[in-house]
Amino acid sequence: MFLHETEYRLGEFILIERSSVLLTWVLQYPMGVQRSGKCYVIGNILVILPWDRHGPGYLRMEFHDHLMKLPIWHKTTFYCFASSLRQVIVGGALTNDQVEQLAVNAINLDSSKTIEPGNFRLGRYKIIAGDNNTFTWRAIGSSNRIMCGTCFIESGILLLDSKKKELDEVTRRLFYSELKLLPPWNKTPAWGHAGSIRGCKESKHDNVFYEVTWNPRSTKSFISDRIPFILSQGRGRERTSDLNTPNNERHKIEWKFLGKLGIFTLESVYNGLRIGVLLLKKLSNYVARKWPIFLGILQKKIHQKRG
């Protein structure tokens, strides 16, 4: 037991803050299984890392009763899963160490920093920085038309809005040849899509970022968690959807899991029988083709012995 341990509620998550520096999350799974992992505060965004340990925990109703007694998490306005953020330089997903480093660097984050206007390259996107820190992105669509949308910087992370509109039609070769000539985007260390950022005040996990009232001028950086919680080295890799279960669906998980397991079992048995029937059919066809030849050879040998 840590001194000064405080628990908070974030949707179906229990957030545990220990001595104001250690921050972990706990989530209940079916059959009394409990998973937990680390999370970091990057500016005004709580970033949830994948689970790295599991074990027995509360039963579902006990966990829910305990969860509802906790105060709501209020130290950040938004949260997201680490798997939804990507590196700017190499384009891959952020590692746990990189997320921790971003949290440390967010202490000195200056949200009022002005970025000079210009055009930049970010993977397959063209980022256009305009006056007064306004940003837009452009990409080539499947119909060879340029797709355009807005983007913005929150807590040192570039976020691309999914709302888009079509512009002029161009060839893919022309678009990418011009894109290669642009300098790479290096104004933020990470980027992601705005739809993966959710509001902490909302109880459901399926509320996207732009549905929440947001004012980039009023955000502040927090230092409620900068030191990682030392855990075992064993680490499980789960999809984001494994953590992203709406609380009004939690009670259906066990029956849904059993139903899917039953369907999977029936499908496996059916496919096994089907393959067996096909093999028997091929075998019978093979025997039917070779049987006259076999009989001819057998009769020939019988005649030779009699002769």
Image (cartoon, rainbow, N blue to C red):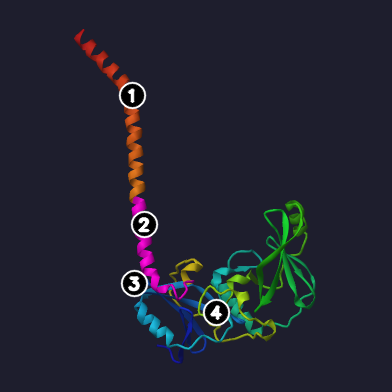
Amino acid type, callout 4: Tyr
For residue 195, which quarter of the picture? Answer: bottom right
Q: Secondary structure at mark 4?
A: strand
Estimate the spatial distance between the alpha carbons at disc 3 and disc 1, rounded to whole Å.
57 Å
Of circles 4 and 3, the one toward us is: 3
Q: Is residue 286 above or below residue 259?
A: above
Of circles 4 and 2, the one toward us is: 2
Q: Secondary structure at mark 3?
A: helix
Label 4 vs 3, first from the N-terminus: 3
Which residue is depicted at the point 44% across and 91% down? 3
Q: Is residue 124 above or below residue 55?
A: above
Query: Which range is magenta?
Result: 244-268
Amino acid type, callout 1: Lys
Amino acid type, callout 2: Ile
Q: Secondary structure at mark 2?
A: helix
Task: Name the mark on residue 263.
Answer: 2
Disc 1: which residue: 290
Of circles 2 and 3, the one toward us is: 2
Disc 3: which residue: 31
Label 4 vs 1, first from the N-terminus: 4
Which residue is depicted at the point 36% across and 47% down? 271
